[in-house]
Every structure is written in C-alpha cells, then in structure tokens.
Image: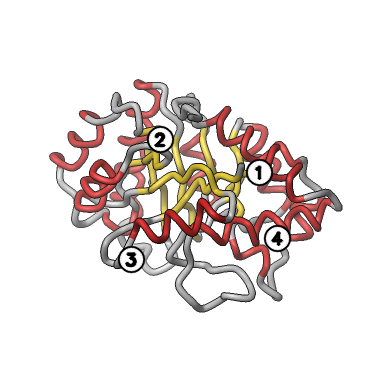
C-alpha cells in the first residue's frame, strides 16, 4: 500500500473526486491525507473525510491576512474527529512577501500551541523561511511532516534530529532538482510520500494537473535512487506515515 500524505482534493480543482480516488486506488494508493489551508477549505476537508480519506486542517501562511478567530476555533473544535489526523498545512512563506512576517509567526505559533496541547502532528509549509521555521519549531514539543522538502542534506539532518519526517513529492523527478542527491544520503525511514496535488506533478506529467495516483511514479523514482523494489519503498514509507499520523486506522 502507498499513502499520499499531502493532497488538496478540492472542488475547485477536480470535477469528479470519486474518479480521482478510484484512479488512486487502482495504482495502489490505499490512503490519502486531504490538507486544508484556510477557513473555507477546512470545512471542505471535514465534508470529504471518511473511509480511506483522512484530513488535516490548518491556516496556511498565505491566508495570514484573511483568517479569523472563528477559523482557528473551528480547527480546535474538530481536532477530536477520528478522521482529522494532523494540523496543517501551516508554517511560514516569505517567497512573495516579507511584509507580514510577524503576523505569519503569530499564526504559526498559535497553531503549534494547539498541536502541542492536543498532541497532534503538524504538516509544515516552509518557503524562503527555513531559519525562522526551525527556530520556532524548537520552541514546541511537536512532531510532523516537513511538506515538500527540497532543502540541503544539512537542513534535512536538523529536521530529522527534531523528530520530523520529510515529505517528498514530484519535485524529486525534475531534471534540475538536487533533491535526489540529498535523498540518497538519507535513511528511508526519514521519508513520506506526497503529491501536493493538484500541484507539482512528477515527470512525465510535469506542468499538468497532479493527482494522488501519481504517488506510484514518485515511489518508483525514489526506489530507484535506493536501488530497491518499489514494494519495499512503499512498505517503509507507509509505515513512516502510519507511525506519525497515528490516528489513521487501516481497514
């Protein structure tokens, strides 16, 4: 079984979500984690979870100027739902704007406090903000996934020593990506598989709409980096996911 630990299965992207789930199942993807990013999408996550679809709810840093206290209260009120397995997607993003750094940090820390209080894993978005992300995470007793990791081996080591796993998606298949060299130096137990669908489709679908079925392509590519069978890579990364997102019950 393969697990897609990070996808965005929202109505605005997919006309027929049941077909997307069917195609994923046909490729051996047994579980997906549907990630929210703002008040509206968190509600949609709650409407979607069930069977083999689990959810993460949180406020993405790009929504820092739009969220309300009611959105944060909604997250807290739904953390006991058996299908909500993490707080995410949360973090810091300085790529487009650095004018709201302090607001981002406050939002990030609020959600980390929730994770610590409720003993929930977190799914971390960090773009152009590695140093601040690490400094803030060190302040809290939390565990989780570093979503769409594409950093250096040294950065990977810092996150791993803090108890985090690294979410690897289609970026690893891109011709100009140096991630494959980093992964080759890391233990398989450090990795989680994700698509970030509808974004970041792996080669040969780069530039097209991504979906969870493409986890199979990513798994094959990473297995080749390690020189092992895809089934072994699937077994290890799925166990990594199940140990981290420990509310998931495999049927």
Left or right: 76 in relation to 152:
left
Q: How would you rate the neighbour count of disc 3 (Cα within 10 Å): few for under 14, some for 14-19, many for 20 or more? A: some
Calculate the distance from the C-alpha at mark 2 to the C-alpha at mark 3: 23 Å
Looking at marks 3 and 4 on the same chain, the residue that comes earlier in the sequence is marked by: 3
Mark 3 vs mark 4: in front: 3
Residue highlighted by disc 4:
179
Mark 4 vs mark 2: in front: 2
Residue highlighted by disc 1:
191
Mark seen at residue 14: 3
Residue occupying the point 39% across, 69% down? 96
Mark 3 vs mark 1: in front: 3
Is label 4 in a helix, a strand or a loop? helix
Contact? badges 2 and 3 (CB < 8 Å) = no
Calculate the distance from the C-alpha at mark 1 to the C-alpha at mark 2: 17 Å
Is label 2 in a helix, a strand or a loop? strand
Residue highlighted by disc 2:
86
Calculate the distance from the C-alpha at mark 3 to the C-alpha at mark 4: 29 Å
Coordinates of residue 29 in the picture (x, y in percent): 55, 48
Left or right: 69 in relation to 94:
left
User: Residue 13, relative to residue 105: is it above or below?
Assistant: below
Residue occupying the point 61% across, 32% down? 162
Of residue 46 and residue 155, the one placed in the foreground of this image is 46
User: Residue 99, relative to residue 53: is it above or below?
Assistant: below
Looking at marks 4 and 2 on the same chain, the residue that comes earlier in the sequence is marked by: 2
Contact? badges 4 and 2 (CB < 8 Å) = no
């Amino acid at each position: 079984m393969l697990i897609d630990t990070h996808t965005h299965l929202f109505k605005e992207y997919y006309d027929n979500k049941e077909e997307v789930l069917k195609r994923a199942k046909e490729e051996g993807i047994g579980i997906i984690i549907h990630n929210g990013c703002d008040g509206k999408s968190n509600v949609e996550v709650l409407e979607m979870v069930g069977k083999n679809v689990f959810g993460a709810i949180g406020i993405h840093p790009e929504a820092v100027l739009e969220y309300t206290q009611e959105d944060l209260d909604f997250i807290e009120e739904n953390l006991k739902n058996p299908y909500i397995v993490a707080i995410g997607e949360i973090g810091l993003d300085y790529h487009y704007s650095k004018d709201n750094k302090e607001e981002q940090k406050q939002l990030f820390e609020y959600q980390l406090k929730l994770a610590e209080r409720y003993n929930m894993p977190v799914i971390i978005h960090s773009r152009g903000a590695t140093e601040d992300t690490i400094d803030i995470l060190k302040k809290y007793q939390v565990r989780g996934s570093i979503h769409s990791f594409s950093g250096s081996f040294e950065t990977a080591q810092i996150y791993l020593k803090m108890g985090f796993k690294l979410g690897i998606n289609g970026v690893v298949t891109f011709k100009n990506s140096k991630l494959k060299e980093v992964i080759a130096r890391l233990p398989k137990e450090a990795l989680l598989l994700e698509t970030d669908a509808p974004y970041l489709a792996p080669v040969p679908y780069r530039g097209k709409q991504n979906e969870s079925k493409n986890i199979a392509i990513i798994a094959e590519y990473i297995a080749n980096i390690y020189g092992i069978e895809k089934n072994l890579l699937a077994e290890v990364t799925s166990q990594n996911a199940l140990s981290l997102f420990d509310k998931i019950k495999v049927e």
